[in-house]
């Protein structure tokens, strides 16, 4: 459970880890980060869980395309 003294917003956590807010939500879902929701439903991230987390590699957050091997992702 996050306390107000050690909790930061999703946007702050994303900036700290050099990633995006949706990636932070996924990390919460996978229990890679610790957080809790406030009364309004906004997620707050436990600052200490960020210290244990590695910044994601670009390959972890790149949108996957067709995967057909053509290299151009032309959609065919």
Image: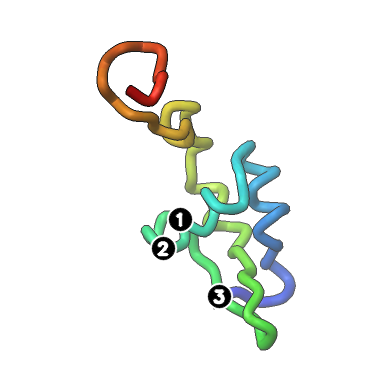
Residue 25 x/y as whole percent: 52, 59
Seen at 49% across and 48% down, the residue is: 52
Label of residue 29 in the image: 2
Q: Which residue is mark 3?
A: 36
Q: Residue 48 versus residue 19: which sits nearer the camera?
A: 19
Instruction: Give coordinates of residue 43: x percent, y percent.
Output: 61, 70
SS of the residue under disc 2: helix
Looking at the image, tell me whether mark 2 or mark 3 is earlier in sequence order: 2
Q: CA distance from mark 2 to mark 3?
A: 11 Å
Q: Residue at x 36, y 11 (%)?
A: 71
Residue 35 in which image quadrant: bottom right
Residue 44: x %, y % from top left: 64, 69
Work out whether 50 lies above or below 74: below
Q: Is residue 66 above or below residue 42?
A: above
In the rendered structure, the answer to whether residue 43 lies left or right of residue 54 reads right
Side of 37 where 11 appears, left or right: right
Most foreground residue, 21 or 51: 21
């Amino acid at each position: 459970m996050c306390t107000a003294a050690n909790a930061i917003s999703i946007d702050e956590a994303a900036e700290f880890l050099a990633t995006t807010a949706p990636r932070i939500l996924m990390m919460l879902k996978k229990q890679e980060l610790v957080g809790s929701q406030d009364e309004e439903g906004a997620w707050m991230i436990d600052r200490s869980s960020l210290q244990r987390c590695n910044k994601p590699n670009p390959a972890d957050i790149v949108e996957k395309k067709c995967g057909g091997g053509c290299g151009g992702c032309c959609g065919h």
